[in-house]
Amino acid sequence: MRTLTRVSAVAVAGALALTTLTACGSDSSSGGASDGKNVKVKIMVGGLDKVIYLPAMLTERLGYFKDEGVSVQLLTEPAGVQAETALVSGDVQGTVGFYDHTLDLQVKGKQVESVVQFSQAPGEVEIVSNQAAGDIKSPKDFKGKKLGVTGIGSSTDFLTKYLAVNSDVQTSQFTPVAVGAGQTFISALQQGSIQGGMTTDPTVATILDKKLGKILIDMRTPEGSKQALGGLYPSSSLYMQTEWVNSHKETVQKLANAFVRTLKWMSTHSADEIAAKMPADYAQGGGKALYAQAIKSTLPMFTTDGVMPADGPATVERVLKAFNPNLKNAEVDLDKTFTTEFVKNAG
Protein backbone atom coordinates (compact mmCIF):
# COMPACT_ATOMS: atom_id res chain seq x y z
CA MET A 1 0.00 0.00 0.00
CA ARG A 2 2.97 2.27 -0.42
CA THR A 3 2.10 5.36 -2.37
CA LEU A 4 5.65 6.44 -3.16
CA THR A 5 7.38 5.27 -6.29
CA ARG A 6 10.63 4.50 -4.50
CA VAL A 7 8.96 2.63 -1.66
CA SER A 8 6.71 0.74 -4.07
CA ALA A 9 9.80 -0.41 -5.90
CA VAL A 10 11.33 -1.57 -2.62
CA ALA A 11 8.14 -3.42 -1.73
CA VAL A 12 7.94 -5.13 -5.11
CA ALA A 13 11.60 -6.06 -4.97
CA GLY A 14 11.07 -7.38 -1.47
CA ALA A 15 8.10 -9.45 -2.55
CA LEU A 16 10.07 -10.90 -5.44
CA ALA A 17 12.99 -11.65 -3.15
CA LEU A 18 10.78 -13.42 -0.66
CA THR A 19 9.40 -15.78 -3.31
CA THR A 20 12.92 -17.14 -3.84
CA LEU A 21 13.64 -17.85 -0.19
CA THR A 22 13.30 -21.17 1.56
CA ALA A 23 11.32 -21.47 4.76
CA CYS A 24 12.47 -22.68 8.20
CA GLY A 25 13.47 -19.57 10.09
CA SER A 26 15.55 -21.43 12.66
CA ASP A 27 17.82 -22.89 9.96
CA SER A 28 21.08 -20.96 9.82
CA SER A 29 21.06 -21.32 6.04
CA SER A 30 17.70 -19.57 5.74
CA GLY A 31 18.26 -16.30 3.93
CA GLY A 32 22.00 -16.99 3.78
CA ALA A 33 22.77 -15.50 7.21
CA SER A 34 25.70 -16.88 9.18
CA ASP A 35 28.07 -15.68 11.85
CA GLY A 36 31.48 -14.40 10.85
CA LYS A 37 32.47 -12.41 7.77
CA ASN A 38 30.21 -11.48 4.86
CA VAL A 39 27.12 -11.72 7.05
CA LYS A 40 23.83 -11.25 5.19
CA VAL A 41 20.58 -10.51 7.00
CA LYS A 42 17.10 -9.73 5.68
CA ILE A 43 14.98 -7.42 7.84
CA MET A 44 11.32 -6.73 7.13
CA VAL A 45 10.10 -3.31 8.23
CA GLY A 46 6.44 -2.51 8.88
CA GLY A 47 6.66 0.56 6.63
CA LEU A 48 10.14 1.83 5.80
CA ASP A 49 8.97 5.42 5.33
CA LYS A 50 7.19 5.65 8.69
CA VAL A 51 9.01 7.91 11.14
CA ILE A 52 8.43 5.40 13.96
CA TYR A 53 10.69 2.96 12.07
CA LEU A 54 13.17 5.62 10.95
CA PRO A 55 16.22 3.99 12.63
CA ALA A 56 16.13 1.12 10.12
CA MET A 57 16.82 3.19 6.99
CA LEU A 58 18.86 5.78 8.89
CA THR A 59 21.30 3.09 10.03
CA GLU A 60 21.72 2.05 6.40
CA ARG A 61 22.19 5.67 5.25
CA LEU A 62 24.77 6.37 7.96
CA GLY A 63 26.78 3.33 6.87
CA TYR A 64 26.68 1.68 10.27
CA PHE A 65 25.68 -1.77 8.98
CA LYS A 66 28.67 -1.65 6.64
CA ASP A 67 30.94 -0.55 9.49
CA GLU A 68 29.91 -3.67 11.40
CA GLY A 69 30.60 -5.91 8.41
CA VAL A 70 27.00 -7.03 8.00
CA SER A 71 25.05 -6.83 4.74
CA VAL A 72 21.46 -5.90 5.58
CA GLN A 73 18.64 -6.02 3.05
CA LEU A 74 15.74 -3.86 4.22
CA LEU A 75 12.36 -4.96 2.92
CA THR A 76 9.02 -3.26 3.57
CA GLU A 77 5.42 -4.20 4.29
CA PRO A 78 2.66 -1.64 4.94
CA ALA A 79 1.60 -3.18 8.26
CA GLY A 80 3.48 -4.65 11.18
CA VAL A 81 1.35 -7.79 11.21
CA GLN A 82 2.56 -8.62 7.69
CA ALA A 83 6.16 -8.00 8.71
CA GLU A 84 5.59 -10.36 11.63
CA THR A 85 4.32 -13.05 9.26
CA ALA A 86 7.48 -12.81 7.15
CA LEU A 87 9.58 -13.44 10.27
CA VAL A 88 7.56 -16.38 11.57
CA SER A 89 7.58 -18.04 8.14
CA GLY A 90 11.37 -17.78 8.05
CA ASP A 91 11.51 -15.51 5.01
CA VAL A 92 13.51 -12.90 6.95
CA GLN A 93 15.79 -13.04 9.96
CA GLY A 94 14.52 -9.89 11.66
CA THR A 95 11.54 -7.58 11.83
CA VAL A 96 11.38 -3.90 12.67
CA GLY A 97 7.93 -3.61 14.18
CA PHE A 98 6.07 -3.23 17.46
CA TYR A 99 7.28 -5.12 20.53
CA ASP A 100 3.70 -6.12 21.40
CA HIS A 101 3.82 -8.79 18.68
CA THR A 102 6.30 -10.77 20.80
CA LEU A 103 3.66 -11.27 23.50
CA ASP A 104 0.94 -12.14 21.01
CA LEU A 105 3.22 -14.68 19.33
CA GLN A 106 4.33 -16.26 22.61
CA VAL A 107 0.80 -17.33 23.50
CA LYS A 108 0.56 -18.80 20.00
CA GLY A 109 3.61 -20.96 20.69
CA LYS A 110 6.22 -18.82 18.89
CA GLN A 111 9.29 -17.63 20.78
CA VAL A 112 10.25 -14.19 19.49
CA GLU A 113 12.16 -11.48 21.34
CA SER A 114 13.02 -7.80 20.99
CA VAL A 115 16.79 -7.41 20.78
CA VAL A 116 16.95 -3.63 20.26
CA GLN A 117 14.17 -1.43 21.66
CA PHE A 118 13.93 1.70 19.52
CA SER A 119 11.14 3.41 21.41
CA GLN A 120 9.34 3.92 24.70
CA ALA A 121 6.06 5.27 23.31
CA PRO A 122 3.82 4.12 20.42
CA GLY A 123 4.46 7.12 18.18
CA GLU A 124 0.84 6.73 17.08
CA VAL A 125 -1.86 9.38 16.74
CA GLU A 126 -5.64 8.91 16.69
CA ILE A 127 -6.88 11.31 14.03
CA VAL A 128 -10.52 12.23 13.34
CA SER A 129 -11.77 13.78 10.13
CA ASN A 130 -13.05 17.34 10.21
CA GLN A 131 -16.54 16.05 9.37
CA ALA A 132 -16.54 13.64 12.32
CA ALA A 133 -14.74 15.87 14.82
CA GLY A 134 -18.00 17.01 16.37
CA ASP A 135 -19.13 13.41 16.93
CA ILE A 136 -15.85 11.92 18.14
CA LYS A 137 -14.48 13.80 21.12
CA SER A 138 -13.03 10.81 23.01
CA PRO A 139 -12.75 7.01 22.61
CA LYS A 140 -16.19 6.78 24.23
CA ASP A 141 -17.52 8.01 20.88
CA PHE A 142 -15.96 5.16 18.86
CA LYS A 143 -19.25 3.26 19.07
CA GLY A 144 -20.76 2.77 15.61
CA LYS A 145 -17.77 4.36 13.85
CA LYS A 146 -15.40 3.06 11.16
CA LEU A 147 -11.82 3.58 12.30
CA GLY A 148 -8.73 3.17 10.15
CA VAL A 149 -5.85 0.87 11.13
CA THR A 150 -2.85 -0.21 9.07
CA GLY A 151 -4.02 -3.83 9.10
CA ILE A 152 -6.26 -6.14 11.11
CA GLY A 153 -4.10 -7.68 13.84
CA SER A 154 -1.59 -4.82 13.59
CA SER A 155 -0.44 -2.74 16.55
CA THR A 156 -2.68 0.13 15.44
CA ASP A 157 -5.55 -2.35 15.64
CA PHE A 158 -4.40 -3.46 19.11
CA LEU A 159 -4.14 0.09 20.43
CA THR A 160 -7.46 1.20 18.93
CA LYS A 161 -9.20 -1.72 20.63
CA TYR A 162 -7.58 -0.89 23.94
CA LEU A 163 -8.62 2.77 23.78
CA ALA A 164 -12.17 1.65 23.07
CA VAL A 165 -12.39 -1.04 25.77
CA ASN A 166 -10.78 1.28 28.30
CA SER A 167 -13.65 3.70 27.61
CA ASP A 168 -16.35 1.02 27.97
CA VAL A 169 -16.81 0.52 24.22
CA GLN A 170 -16.73 -3.13 23.18
CA THR A 171 -14.62 -4.18 20.20
CA SER A 172 -17.79 -5.38 18.47
CA GLN A 173 -19.33 -1.90 18.68
CA PHE A 174 -17.04 -0.26 16.11
CA THR A 175 -15.46 -1.34 12.84
CA PRO A 176 -11.70 -1.37 12.27
CA VAL A 177 -10.86 -0.81 8.61
CA ALA A 178 -7.48 -1.79 7.13
CA VAL A 179 -6.36 1.29 5.18
CA GLY A 180 -2.57 1.13 5.47
CA ALA A 181 -0.72 4.43 5.89
CA GLY A 182 0.24 7.40 3.78
CA GLN A 183 -2.01 8.26 0.86
CA THR A 184 -4.32 5.26 1.31
CA PHE A 185 -5.10 6.38 4.86
CA ILE A 186 -5.54 9.99 3.78
CA SER A 187 -7.85 9.03 0.90
CA ALA A 188 -10.02 6.91 3.19
CA LEU A 189 -10.34 9.86 5.57
CA GLN A 190 -11.18 12.28 2.75
CA GLN A 191 -13.75 9.96 1.18
CA GLY A 192 -15.49 9.28 4.47
CA SER A 193 -14.90 5.53 4.37
CA ILE A 194 -13.44 6.03 7.85
CA GLN A 195 -14.36 8.71 10.39
CA GLY A 196 -11.00 8.52 12.10
CA GLY A 197 -8.05 6.24 12.57
CA MET A 198 -4.64 5.57 14.02
CA THR A 199 -1.54 6.49 12.05
CA THR A 200 1.96 7.89 12.35
CA ASP A 201 4.17 10.59 10.91
CA PRO A 202 4.67 11.70 8.20
CA THR A 203 0.99 10.87 7.51
CA VAL A 204 -0.08 12.87 10.58
CA ALA A 205 1.89 15.93 9.49
CA THR A 206 0.36 15.77 6.00
CA ILE A 207 -3.20 15.51 7.33
CA LEU A 208 -2.71 18.49 9.63
CA ASP A 209 -0.97 20.52 6.93
CA LYS A 210 -3.83 19.91 4.49
CA LYS A 211 -6.37 20.56 7.27
CA LEU A 212 -8.12 17.24 6.65
CA GLY A 213 -8.44 16.20 10.27
CA LYS A 214 -7.66 16.84 13.92
CA ILE A 215 -5.68 15.02 16.59
CA LEU A 216 -7.81 13.21 19.15
CA ILE A 217 -5.07 11.32 21.02
CA ASP A 218 -1.33 11.91 20.65
CA MET A 219 0.99 9.08 21.72
CA ARG A 220 4.20 10.36 20.13
CA THR A 221 5.79 11.22 23.46
CA PRO A 222 6.36 9.34 26.74
CA GLU A 223 3.92 11.76 28.38
CA GLY A 224 1.27 11.03 25.76
CA SER A 225 1.80 7.31 26.20
CA LYS A 226 1.37 7.55 29.96
CA GLN A 227 -1.80 9.61 29.59
CA ALA A 228 -3.46 7.30 27.06
CA LEU A 229 -2.11 3.91 28.15
CA GLY A 230 -1.14 4.37 31.78
CA GLY A 231 2.59 3.95 31.28
CA LEU A 232 5.49 3.81 28.86
CA TYR A 233 4.62 1.61 25.89
CA PRO A 234 7.70 0.19 24.15
CA SER A 235 6.78 -0.09 20.49
CA SER A 236 9.14 -0.04 17.52
CA SER A 237 11.96 -2.53 17.91
CA LEU A 238 14.11 -5.07 16.14
CA TYR A 239 12.64 -8.43 17.06
CA MET A 240 13.82 -11.86 15.98
CA GLN A 241 13.08 -15.52 16.58
CA THR A 242 14.75 -16.52 19.85
CA GLU A 243 16.25 -19.70 18.41
CA TRP A 244 17.88 -17.70 15.61
CA VAL A 245 19.23 -15.15 18.09
CA ASN A 246 20.78 -17.85 20.24
CA SER A 247 22.48 -19.50 17.27
CA HIS A 248 23.70 -16.24 15.66
CA LYS A 249 24.88 -14.16 18.60
CA GLU A 250 27.81 -12.60 16.76
CA THR A 251 25.53 -11.38 13.98
CA VAL A 252 22.90 -10.09 16.41
CA GLN A 253 25.59 -8.19 18.31
CA LYS A 254 26.68 -6.49 15.08
CA LEU A 255 23.10 -5.42 14.38
CA ALA A 256 22.70 -4.15 17.94
CA ASN A 257 25.97 -2.19 17.67
CA ALA A 258 24.76 -0.51 14.48
CA PHE A 259 21.28 0.34 15.76
CA VAL A 260 22.44 1.64 19.16
CA ARG A 261 24.98 3.82 17.38
CA THR A 262 22.13 5.23 15.27
CA LEU A 263 19.93 5.91 18.31
CA LYS A 264 22.79 7.80 19.96
CA TRP A 265 23.37 9.76 16.74
CA MET A 266 19.70 10.69 16.62
CA SER A 267 19.80 11.97 20.20
CA THR A 268 22.55 14.45 19.33
CA HIS A 269 21.25 15.72 15.97
CA SER A 270 18.31 17.91 15.01
CA ALA A 271 15.23 16.82 13.11
CA ASP A 272 16.50 18.79 10.10
CA GLU A 273 19.81 16.94 10.19
CA ILE A 274 18.05 13.59 10.46
CA ALA A 275 15.67 14.43 7.60
CA ALA A 276 18.62 15.37 5.39
CA LYS A 277 19.98 11.84 5.72
CA MET A 278 16.73 10.15 4.66
CA PRO A 279 15.47 9.43 1.11
CA ALA A 280 13.74 12.54 -0.27
CA ASP A 281 10.56 10.67 -1.21
CA TYR A 282 9.90 9.65 2.40
CA ALA A 283 8.34 13.08 2.88
CA GLN A 284 5.21 11.74 1.11
CA GLY A 285 4.94 14.83 -1.08
CA GLY A 286 4.80 17.23 1.86
CA GLY A 287 8.23 18.72 1.28
CA LYS A 288 11.45 18.73 3.28
CA ALA A 289 10.28 21.21 5.94
CA LEU A 290 7.09 19.29 6.71
CA TYR A 291 9.00 16.00 6.89
CA ALA A 292 11.48 17.51 9.32
CA GLN A 293 8.56 18.70 11.45
CA ALA A 294 7.12 15.18 11.40
CA ILE A 295 10.43 13.82 12.68
CA LYS A 296 10.63 16.51 15.37
CA SER A 297 7.13 15.60 16.63
CA THR A 298 8.05 11.92 16.88
CA LEU A 299 11.63 12.10 18.17
CA PRO A 300 10.64 12.02 21.89
CA MET A 301 9.44 8.42 21.49
CA PHE A 302 12.93 7.02 20.80
CA THR A 303 15.33 5.56 23.33
CA THR A 304 18.97 6.65 23.25
CA ASP A 305 20.45 3.25 24.08
CA GLY A 306 18.10 0.56 22.75
CA VAL A 307 17.32 -0.70 26.26
CA MET A 308 13.82 -1.86 27.14
CA PRO A 309 12.09 0.54 29.61
CA ALA A 310 11.83 -1.19 32.99
CA ASP A 311 8.04 -1.08 33.31
CA GLY A 312 7.32 -1.19 29.58
CA PRO A 313 6.62 -4.91 29.11
CA ALA A 314 4.09 -4.93 31.97
CA THR A 315 2.22 -1.99 30.41
CA VAL A 316 2.07 -3.77 27.05
CA GLU A 317 0.79 -6.96 28.72
CA ARG A 318 -1.91 -5.03 30.57
CA VAL A 319 -3.01 -3.24 27.41
CA LEU A 320 -3.19 -6.44 25.34
CA LYS A 321 -5.02 -8.42 28.03
CA ALA A 322 -7.71 -5.74 28.19
CA PHE A 323 -9.17 -6.79 24.82
CA ASN A 324 -7.29 -9.79 23.39
CA PRO A 325 -9.07 -13.06 24.25
CA ASN A 326 -5.95 -15.09 23.38
CA LEU A 327 -3.94 -13.24 26.01
CA LYS A 328 -6.60 -12.50 28.62
CA ASN A 329 -6.16 -15.68 30.66
CA ALA A 330 -2.77 -16.72 29.30
CA GLU A 331 0.44 -16.81 31.26
CA VAL A 332 3.01 -14.62 29.53
CA ASP A 333 6.70 -14.94 30.41
CA LEU A 334 7.73 -11.33 29.83
CA ASP A 335 11.42 -12.12 30.41
CA LYS A 336 11.35 -14.19 27.22
CA THR A 337 9.87 -11.40 25.07
CA PHE A 338 13.01 -9.24 25.09
CA THR A 339 16.72 -9.29 25.84
CA THR A 340 19.09 -6.49 26.82
CA GLU A 341 22.20 -8.66 26.38
CA PHE A 342 23.22 -7.17 23.04
CA VAL A 343 22.40 -3.50 23.56
CA LYS A 344 24.26 -3.47 26.88
CA ASN A 345 27.30 -4.85 25.11
CA ALA A 346 27.04 -2.35 22.28
CA GLY A 347 29.82 0.22 22.19
Image (cartoon, helix red, strand yellow):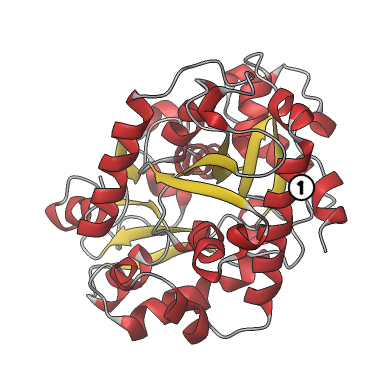
User: 232 above or below 62?
Assistant: above
Seen from the viewer's position, the closer of residues 198 and 170 is 198
Seen from the viewer's position, the closer of residues 339 and 173 is 339
Instruction: Judge left or right: residue 303 versus residue 193.
Output: right
For the C terminus, which image quadrant? bottom right
SS for callout 1:
helix
Residue on which disc 1 sits: 253
Residue at x 24% of width, y 75% of height: 211
Q: Position of residue 252 (x, y in %)?
A: 72, 43
Instruction: Judge left or right: residue 339 versus residue 50.
Output: right
User: 336 above or below 289?
Assistant: above
Instruction: Judge left or right: residue 251 versus residue 41.
Output: right
Residue at x 47% of width, y 86% of height: 272
Seen from the viewer's position, the closer of residues 29 and 201 is 29
Q: Position of residue 273 (x, y in %)?
A: 51, 85
Residue 298 seen by the camera: yes
Residue at x 58% of width, y 54% of height: 122
Q: Residues within 10 Å of mark 1 (few under 14, many from 20)?
A: many
User: Which residue type does callout 1 highlight?
Assistant: Gln
